[in-house]
Image (cartoon, grey):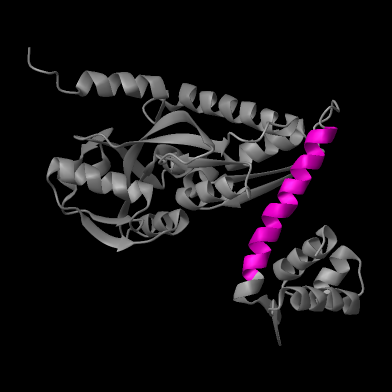
Amino acid sequence: MDIKQLKNFLRIVELKSFSEASKHVRIAQPALGLQVRKLEEELGVKLLERHARGVSPTEAGMLLYEHADIILRQVERAKNEVVDVADTPRGNIAFGLTPTVSLVMGAALVEKYHALCPNVSLRVVDGLSELLVEWVSTGRLDLAFTYNPSGAVGLELEPLLVESLYLVGPADAPQLSGDTISLSSLTDVPIVLPSKPQVLRTLVDEGAAKAGVDLNVYLEIDSVQTMKELVERSVAYTVLPFGAVEAEVGEGRFAASRIIEPEINRTLSIVYSSRRPPSKAFTILHELIQDISETLIKRGAASWRPVEENITAAKAAAPRDAA
């Protein structure tokens, strides 16, 4: 088993076709088939299932794919760190975005980073917080955005900002005529939320328990885009940070009010490995994320706040010990 075999195997699995992989890696299709057969003979397992639509990995093949992806990224990192003395950043960077982060800053982050580092190959992955943190831990991602994560060994967690959550509904919704809305007034409002144990759902459930109210969770859907479409069709309301619906509110398609009593907040952080020295490409990405976060805070009013401000507010609201 060598690096070239692993690279070609990954390409076959990703393209689901020997013929398409052959075009990309510029190796004859019979030679690719021979490489896979040698891998299967060496490992003593079947790696690929052939069918009319192409090929798909077996359980063993998927396991090899995941390990190979990590190994090849580590090889690439080693090469990048050796040549990182060059003035121009190069190499590969992979980072993960949660669905709402993708809506708020995904396009701007990619556009600005590509302008700063045109020689860096950028890979962007969308996923839920828990999965992205796992991929950073295993080395599949260099960095990821995450909400309210629990600690992980070998990972550096850096809070960026605090988001307030909003009730979002149709533009003519009478409940959303004011800037704020109390959680206790939502008992009769049909709400679509992500399923448990997603962070947003956990925070809303904890807020409802604190307020002593039972929310009317009309649907559970793990797609921000689908939740927004249901709001636009007047099927249900939802709960999101303002940044995820800012465009629709500005266009008069949605209305949104910040939830209070209790206020529901979540902390947006980035997570990355504390075991790997940062490359120039990584350092530029890190600094760009901080700059964009500061911009969001400056223009976000009640939607985005500095982490320090939220800590101060929490301490002020906490009950004091009796003298």
Residue furthest left as drawn: 323
Which one is nearer the viewer's eye here, 146 or 279? 279
Whole-percent x, y for residue 100 in the image: 47, 45
Q: Which residues are magenta?
A: 62-83
Q: What is the quadrant of residue 265 in the picture?
A: top left
Of residue 240 and residue 157, the one placed in the foreground of this image is 157
- The dominant secondary structure in magenta is helix
Q: Is residue 199 left or right of residue 16?
A: left
For the N terminus, the image quarter is bottom right
Q: Position of residue 16 (x, y in %)?
A: 72, 73
Looking at the rendered structure, the number of numbered marks drawn on it comes to: 0
Q: In the rendered image, which quarter is residue 302 located in?
A: top left
Identified at 33% across, 55% down, the residue is: 193
The answer to whether residue 266 is magenta is no
Q: Residue at x 43, y 39 (%)?
A: 151
Image: 47 above or below 308: below
- Closest to the observer: 198 or 294? 198
- Residue 308, how many percent across, how many down? 39, 20
Q: Nearer the viewer, residue 84 or 210?
A: 84
Q: Please indicate, yes or no, whether residue 174 appears anywhere in the rendered image.
A: no
Work out whether 232 lies above or below 62: above
In the image, 231: left or right of 98? left
Q: Is residue 68 magenta?
A: yes
Q: Residue at x 33, y 61 (%)?
A: 220
Instruction: Give x and y (percent) for residue 40.
Output: 75, 77
